[in-house]
Image (cartoon, coloured by chain):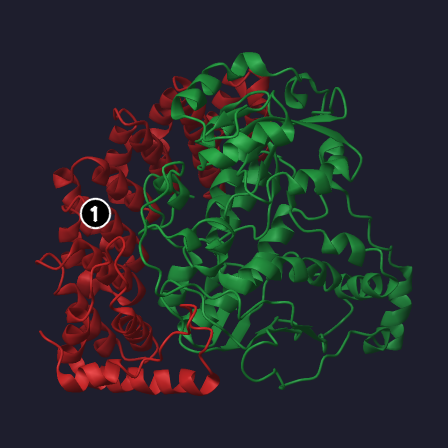
Chain colours: A green, B red
Amino acid sequence: MPDQPVSRRRFLQGAATAAAAFSIVPRGVLGGEKGAPPSETFACGLIGCGSQAGEDINSYIKHWGAEFRVLAAADVHYGRLSNAKKRWGEQVELYTDWRRVVERRDIDVVSIATPPHWHALCCIAAAQAGKDILCEKPMTKFIAEGRAVVTAVKRYGRVFQIGTSGRFGAAKSPVSRQIHKIMRSGLLKSCPAVHIQKGGFPVRRYCGLVNAVPEPAPKELDWDMYCGPAPVRPYHHDRFGWNHRFYWDYEGGALADFAQHYMDPFQWIYGKDDTSPVEIESLAPPAHPECCTPWAWVELKYADGLTLVLDGNEWGPRYDRKPARQLKLEDLDAESQEKLKALPDPEPLLTFPEAVRQRKESGGHVEAAHRAITIAHLANISIRLGRKIKYDPVKEEVIGDDVANRLVYQPMREPWHL
Amino acid sequence: MPASAELKALVEQVPDHDKGGSYVNLTPESGEAMRKLTAELHKGGRDAVLGIIDMLVEPKVGEPVKDIKPHYALHMLAVHVTGLGDDKARAEFATTLASQLGGDRPKAIQKYLIQELGVCGGKEVVEPLGKMLLDAELCDDAARALAAIKDCAADVLLAALPQVQGRGRLSVVKKLAVLKCEKAAEVFKQALSDQDPDVRIAGGWGIARIADAPAADALLKAADGAKDWLRINLSDAAMSLADALLAAGKKPEAAAIYAHIAKTRTDPAEKHLKEAAERGLAAAK
């Protein structure tokens, strides 16, 4: 493969011959009664061929003891695509339209490493096509996308793993396991814990350029397809590539980019994989319409009293309303402590390969991932509107604030929909 | 309306961005000043809003951005009016924005006004937004804003549909589906046989969104005859419809769809569909 942009014609040829190109029998086709694999080799399709492409494959398949082979790759940037064969082998068929990857019958697992405004649509389509899914974080750009992904994954019995693994470590910690057990026991009447995530958010770096001079889009980039469900803005290189994180159109700044890492273990420890905060308040200057701007902290309260704080620790005053306070066994009365001892310890979390083999939920499963990134989205809604919001975690709607709900569900550009 | 010198001076109080081009240089104090400035601008009423709009400049390739401050100021106002608890004030602001649609202003500026109407607009602006559906360049933006506003938007989308051309038709059908417009049942059904595959997908999605049981046969027929991406989407629309009917207690209607999918999706590559339909069938008993 020459180290230069690949022509559209070449891609079309690749698509046309794709059916004859694969050499791995797909697990879903030859699998046993529950889709058990004929071998330990996963046939993979990559959607997005940037710097994160294949990272989750390396992390969640190879690292956890299974082989994989990439058969197809898609990207809107021809230059990136041309590197896919170098990285993954000559068998890889290349596509500029990710839908062609999803259509292929021989793909078991789709690995999604596009900018986040594409994640939900790719996940949903992969589930609809019967693929298991590895999705880079953040899982979604807005809350309603997450619910749609959960619905699709559950409807078709797919295995989903989000691209972060903090909970696997947390689940091995005795202290975390005890908190998890207390929280899931139902023995705690109210939760006095205050969990403060202090720092770890590059707040100052993750601010978009308000003076970005429109540029001609590079010839090797399909800018319209890159924008996808998001509004089409004049091209600027800062909006493409790594810095897309700084713009509301594609992600949601430091909160969206990092919160999934921190909230993934937090949610497991505190047993919040099936719910969300009910009150959200933030300290930040008025937000810009397109570019992410700095923020100081966000306080999120759960219905049971648990307080979660995301303290940026880079801008403005530090959070000082409450001190951090971990949940302790002594927060239960003596009788409840005895009852807790009789309860079983939490089940070990399944790795992605284990989950695929057993057709069970992976440790970083879809509902957990959705609820984790919902925390970041709620925080950003409060920041963008400059006000406290109240959230119904069952209906997944902001209470009494129609404008806030326009950020919960953001209508997409045609032809895309949830 | 040209911005007055006083208004220009106020807008100039929006902080400068930093040397790198971002607003990382904001401080808690400047943030508070921006809120006070927004309230001050709001006191200027319609004239101030029109003046700020007049300060907006169409972005052009290779040319420096010339309207950073009024651009920011208009958005701060749009958010500000949604947090006052004063619906009259919000509607007045939105009406002023909407009054600038359809004229000679560059389309890029009209797109920005539509975007901000998606933030702060209500039923008072659905009519002017509806007119923008007939403008090929603004149609999708207007449709998205209408879908965000929700209130009274479906009727406007439905009324405009016969006059909307080209890809705009897809935008409108999709947003009728977003809004779960039951009056559009026939539109969705007809869309299943549209020449444009994306419109067919939109039709299937709309049928599922409104849980239109009588359209099930047409949807299944369209799904059965489709291939690749279209088949994936229409099959999912059929499953979504069945799930919606089941949730609504319409077990026989749901079961009929599940049974059809379970019977017809025999290809190993569609095993997940067959299994999902069988689970649905069991739940519908």
Identify residue type, mark 1. Answer: Cys
Left or right position of B48 against A370: left
Estimate how packed mark 1 is, as few (under 14), some (14 to 19) or many (20 or more) residues with alpha carbons within 10 Å. Answer: many
A312 up-or-down from B195: above or below: below
- Looking at the picture, tell me which residue is in the foreground, A348 or B22: B22
Left or right position of B184 against A51: left
Q: Is residue B210 visible?
A: no
Report the residue at 38% width, 69% height from top: A288
A279 up-or-down from A397: above or below: below
Quadrant position of the N terminus of chain B in the picture: bottom left
Q: Return the x and y of residue A105 as percentages of the image width and height.
A: 56, 20
Quarter occupied by residue A126 = top right
Q: Is residue B274 visible?
A: yes
Give the residue number, with chain letter if any, for mark 1: B139
- Looking at the picture, tell me which residue is in the foreground, B182 or A222: A222
Q: Residue furthest top?
A: A20
Instruction: Give the mark count.
Output: 1
Q: Return the x and y of residue B67 as percentages of the image width and height.
A: 25, 69
Q: Return the x and y of residue A98 as percentages of the image width and height.
A: 47, 32
Q: Return the x and y of residue A125 as percentages of the image width and height.
A: 49, 35
